[in-house]
Amino acid sequence: MKKSYSIRLKRRKNNTWKIVLIAAVAAAVIFALVYFLFFSGRGRKEEKPLDVISIIDIDSTAVTAETTDISERQNEARIRSNSINYPYAFENEIIYSSRRNGKGGFKRLIIYTIDKASEKEYTVSVKYNNINGLVMNSDYIAFLDSSETGGGRICVVDRSTGEQKSVKDYAYAMPKLVLVGNKLVFMQQAGTSTDRLYIYDMDTGESVCAKVFEGTVGLNGGVSADGNSIMYSVLYYEDDVLKSHITEIDLSTGTETSYDWERYAYAPQKNSGRIVFLSSASGVPDDLYISENGETPYLLESDVTNMQVGEGFVAYTKDDVIYAYVFQTGRRYKLSKDISKGLLQMVNGNIVLWYDVTSYLDVDAIKYMDFRWE
């Protein structure tokens, strides 16, 4: 190559070719320098491969299929009350608390029958000002009788006899009540640095403290249950970074399984072998993650408002729209209509229930769907 250049230069000794040769040599030198600096790794800081935590924090979504709009199947509960507090759906009924004549605390307990579009007040004893945290099955109703100044008590009502029992008083934050068959599961803050996990048998009236948490740990999002196990998240700090580990307790054996993906995890829930939780790098947890059988979680959706796991799916609110993502098929469905704004309230089995928050007037509106998919 150099010889051919030399011959050509001898034959054509003019300034143009000299300039071309100089430019070519300069370009070659620059290319070699760039290659040395950026491709040999000696002239720059060596990049580390992405670790697991970096991978699951990538701002992408696992939902790649188009969203199927089934919002025409939504229903509205024709509830006459203007104020609807803590609605909870079970089979053909929706239970909620309401104010009397629109004034005072939420002391009225109402059961709305879906197929008849009728409602009836259910008599309970209220010691404090508000009925909150409602859950229900065919045998029992459980709720929080809460004081506006803090504290209250956990109550259970036998639906067959109307007998009401006070399960436990609480002095701090409102516990989150979860039903596992006829057992009531909840976390209770027992002090500034003590939390207790209770399992209350509503048939026998026996209560068991399954676990005590001491120290500076913080329970994150209450407890959840899938019928076979209960699950919760505990916060901890590592090098000033807030992280969580998720614990699952098998109700039949008492065996504990721990999951720690070295990240912040809020309100974990499990169904169909999937663990679903909310997380964020900072601020409010609004990124929705799924772990398949305890494996490394992947990001399902960013910027969600809240979520609840149902039978084989997770429902969530995003941009005032209610969606449902089916685990087995990987398909996403739109449940609420474009002309309204929704806020997910609860999921029980296949029933998804949400508030219509299109108008923030004094009248509450409830929409729901018996979510089925192909």
Image: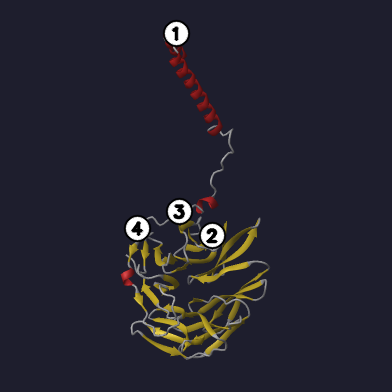
* Crowd rating for badge 2 (residues with CA inside 10 Å; few <14, some 14–19, many 20+): some
Q: To which residue does mark 4 refer?
A: 66
Residue 157 shows up from this direction: yes
Q: Indicate which label's residue lies in the foreground, 1 or 2.
A: 1
Task: Name the spot of residue 107 as percent of width and height, x first.
Answer: 51, 87
The colour scheme used here is secondary structure
Report which residue position mark 1 lands on.
10
* Front disc: 1 or 4: 1
Q: Residue at x 62, y 67 (%)?
A: 218
Image point (55%, 88%), residue name: 165
Q: What is the number of callouts on the image?
A: 4
The residue at which mark 2 appears reads as 280
Residue 110 lies left or right of residue 260; in this view the side is: left
Kindly identify which residue carries mark 3.
60
Contact, CB < 8 Å: mark 2 with mark 4? no
Q: For residue 341, which quarter of the picture? A: bottom left
